[in-house]
Amino acid sequence: MRLRARRRNLVVWSSSAGPGGPDCRGRGLEPRRPARSWRTRRRLRTGVLLVAISLIRLGAAVRPRWRPLLAGAVLTAAGVVLRSGMAGVVMIPGMLFLVSALLVPADPEAAGPRRRELERELAAYSTPAQVRDLEAILDRYPDSDTGELRDILARQATAAGPR
């Protein structure tokens, strides 16, 4: 099944007034848009759909740290291109994504195994007396050196619940 062929050239046999004049109404002589505008719209929609699909696939393949950066770059670029209309408002979320990309930890995958091992070792301090002894040892060192240990201990205390 095929689409019907569209008429490309309209022939006006008699026109007393200009296009769209008063005596053209009701006789099929109204001004029409260009014949190929539907092709342009269809290609534009197809192109936008392909770009959206490729961005979704690219976002799935990118590391978690780069996802907000990718989204921010796309939205900011779209906002710059469309800045004259209301669509230019997408620049604001794009800028917010770019700022939030700075707040994502540098490499969570590399820190994962080391941190899990540290959590297992600190879980050995199970009694309150052992935890107090460990905290007394940690108090001898600056917070910049023991901050990660204190964070793990605090998380384990909240996970264990009230004792």
Image (tube, grey):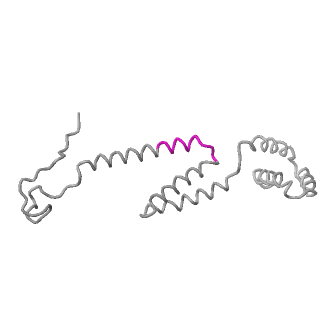
- Please say if 9 is above or below 78: above
Let me know if residue 117 is in the magenta part: no
User: Could you say where residue 47 lies in the image, as x and y percent from the top left?
Assistant: 40, 45
User: Could you say where residue 48 lies in the image, as x and y percent from the top left?
Assistant: 42, 47
* Residue at horizontal 71 percent and vertical 49 percent from the top: 106
91 sits to left or right of 11: right
In the foreground, 121 or 30 = 30
- Please say if 140 is above or below 43: below
Outermost residue, top side: 1
44 sits to left or right of 6: right
Magenta-tinted stretch: 53-64
Query: Could you tell me which quadrant the N terminus lies in?
Result: top left
* Res 139 → quadrant: bottom right
139 sits to left or right of 120: right
In the foreground, 135 or 109 = 109
Query: Could you tell me which quadrant the C terminus lies in?
Result: bottom right
User: Could you say where residue 102 lies in the image, as x and y percent from the top left?
Assistant: 66, 55
* Residue at horizontal 52 percent and vertical 52 percent from the top: 74
